[in-house]
Image (cartoon, grey):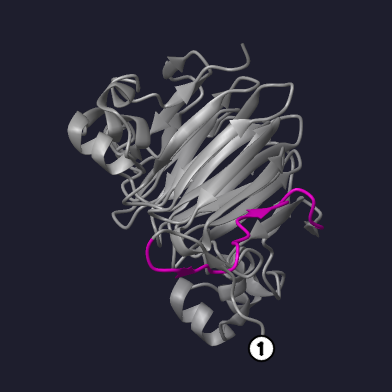
Amino acid sequence: MAKSPKTKSKGKSRTKAPALNFTYDLEGQKPAVWKAGNSKEVSVRELPISKGVAGVSMRLKPGGIRELHWHAIAAEWGFFITGKGRVTVVNPAGEWDTQEYGPGDIFFVPQGYAHYIENIGADECHFLLAFNNGAFNEFSTFSITEWIAQTPRDVLIKNFGLPADVFDKFPKKEVYMALGTPPGRRSLAEGDKLVTPARSHKFRLRAQEGRVYSGGTVKMATIDNFPASDVMAGALMTLAPGALREMHWHPNANEWGYVLSGTVSITLFAADAGSTTQKVKAGGVFYIPMGCGHYLENVGKDEVEMLLVFDNGVYEEISISEWIADTPVDVAATVFGVPEKTIKEFPESEVFISGGKG
């Protein structure tokens, strides 16, 4: 049996675990195809490290509908990349939230809530879905068509009070995606209940002002500004060529990222597994386990834009620059074995994103 490599240190030797694979070429995979669109997924089955979050890249043709369904084991966080869509969410109180979406908008569906997604535009719409359970399987969700198809006819007659022949033309299996004509604006039927604005399941992420740094920008969606999304948070981040998203970690959440454009180099520091660096191009995803140190660098010639999703509605991070800045100078100097004047040359506050090529 081969022995695990050991890292050298002045103290006790430390066994080094195998390097981790934390990236996956999602858009490079073959999709599952229906008449109304297609879908690709990445879960713990495709990317074993991704235990906390699973993701789906879905496209709907004009008039396409991701049918009425719900998810028993995960909440859903969606981001529209292209096209125009409409998402309807129904909560246990019977309140309907029907909203229209465009590129840069996000929606949130709490675990177990009924919902469906429509393409109401003239072109294909493409959106990402993230779920706060790495074992989630998009193709094993609870669909209304499949349930009715599997229910005995006499039960359906009792349940709905309708004649038996009403169900003769109903689907005999799950529809998953249905194709119709692009619908016009739909008004709520009389008696339907509207949700209050504070509980809206829609948030215009790209429209936010965000924070601007010398090397990039970040726009956040957390429980603070998107109250409905209480168990998941997200960010839209850009990095200029050569810019660095500084060394940091998240103590309360796993991070799942999708590269919208450009090429980013990501280094994951996982203690015994050491540091592993992998590049991710547009259409690829990456996963950072909770508590693992990491940094992201734009190594290409073009701007990088990334969508980041966290499986906690409260966003938390600890950055190495801020930690050193807040540590007493004598303590930091002793730990690093350098003069105090060296520590005083470090940044006095969090860097977050450092400037690009200069």
Q: Quadrant of residue 321?
A: top left
Q: Quick check: 124 left or right of 306?
A: right
Spot occupied by residue 138 in the image (x, y as percentages of width and height): 60, 63
Image: 43 above or below 309: below
Name the quarter where the C terminus is drawn.
top right
Badge 1 amino acid:
Met
Which is the main secondary structure of the residues drawn in magenta?
loop
Q: Is residue 297 magenta?
A: no
Q: x and y percent of residue 247 in the render?
A: 44, 37
Q: Residue at x 75, y 48 (%)?
A: 27
Residue closer to the observer: 79 or 234 = 234
Image coordinates of residue 109 in percent, x first then y, are 43, 50
**Which residue is at the front of the view, 49 or 122?**
49
Q: How many marks?
A: 1
Residue 297 x/y as whole percent: 59, 32
Residue 119 visible to the viewer: no
Q: Which residue matches tag 1?
A: 1
**Residue drawn at the location 55% of the way across and 64% of the way down:** 49
Packing grade of label 1 (10 A; few <14, some 14-19, many >=20) is: few
Which residues lie in the magenta part?
Answer: 11-30
